[in-house]
Image (cartoon, rainbow, N blue to C red):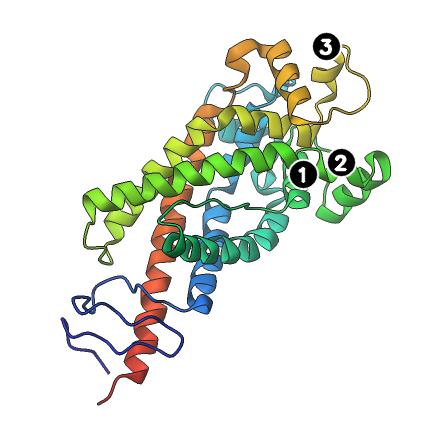
Amino acid sequence: MELSRGRPAAALPGMEAESPGEDYESLPTGASLSTHMTAGAVAGILEHTVMYPVDSVKTRMQSLQPDPKAQYKSVYGALKKIIHTEGFWRPLRGINVTVLGAGPAHAMYFACYEKMKRTLSDIIHHGGNSHLANVVKQRMQMYNSPYKTVLECIRAVHRTEGLAAFYRSYTTQLTMNVPFQAIHFITYELMQEQINPRREYNPRSHVLSGAIAGAVAAAATTPLDVCKTLLNTQENMALSSVNISGHLSGMANAFRTVYQLGGIPGYFRGVQARVIYQMPSTAIAWSVYEFFKYFLTKHKLEKRAPY
């Protein structure tokens, strides 16, 4: 049954009552935890799967000493070359482990966001993807990766480098995710204040705010992402060129190595691909999340509304 526009809807059990001025077209302010988690999971999976080929390109473009056959000038040129020389499905290698991690991670991600936004006045930060998934994903994305399946990659890395290999970039990833999410969420909220001050369900405002938030956060944290990629992939050619034997570990070592190999510009390798990846990714994530939050909450309200 359709609710009349402009009439306050009854609050669901376990939900905060909507404000007196909140109408049917407004984004729900008291959606349930399950709604936030469901909307977040769907948004996360779509965000990472739709843009995964660009993420593969970004990983390769961050290589400090790329193979001569894996040097790219643009994202489009890289995708075209990879598909032509390595096969149509090559840019998607490792996507299955990303999907497995993205759903649960983003369910918690957005649930934490909503909770912290209400309790800490929009001062928010949250962790993100699992470290094992990131290591496996980036190893499978690299040029000439010997791994054909996720399990093969996990077993090989564990056998040759030990369990610690999956956590080498832990500090760097945590250090990157805190400022990334802080910049991301604050920018999104500031954009919403400017273009959607009434916080209505407005897909265009969610897409625009999400894209700008993703671009700003991605550009600002690219140096940390380059270090994370180095720690996750352990580029043998790059390390041997600066006489580093064994395995690189720790954020400080990664920062020094990147500088040794590429100077200041080295910290911004792949920034174009990272921004191109993040803009549509975050636009997709926010628009899908806001839609499902709106749809699921309003559906529950309609079911409970008196005839």
Secondary structure beneath dot 2 equals helix
The x and y percentages for residue 102 are 55, 52
User: Is residue 18 depicted above or below 174 in this figure?
Assistant: below
Give residue 242's mark: 3
Please indicate whether residue 40 sits to the left or right of residue 301 in the image.
right
CA gap, disc 2 to disc 1?
A: 8 Å
Residue 45: % across, % down: 50, 53
Which numbered mark, 2 or 1, is in the foreground of this view?
2
| Residue extending furthest toward the front | 120
Q: Label 1: few (<14), some or many (≥20) within 10 Å?
A: many
Q: Quadrant of the C terminus?
A: bottom left
Circles 2 and 3, Cβ within 8 Å, touching? The answer is no
Of label 1 and label 3, which has the lower sequence position?
A: 1
Tags 2 and 1 touching, CB below 8 Å:
yes
For disc 2, the marked residue is 165
Residue 65 seen in render: no
First in residue order: circle 2 vs circle 3: 2
Q: Position of residue 62 (x, y in %)?
A: 57, 24
- For the residue marked with disc 1, what is the amino acid? Val
User: Disc 1 marks which residue?
Assistant: 135
Residues at marks 1 and 3, CA–CA distance in whole angstroms? 23 Å
Q: Residues within 10 Å of mark 3 (few under 14, many from 20)?
A: few
Q: CA distance from mark 2 to mark 3?
A: 21 Å
Amino acid type for the residue under numbered disc 3: Val
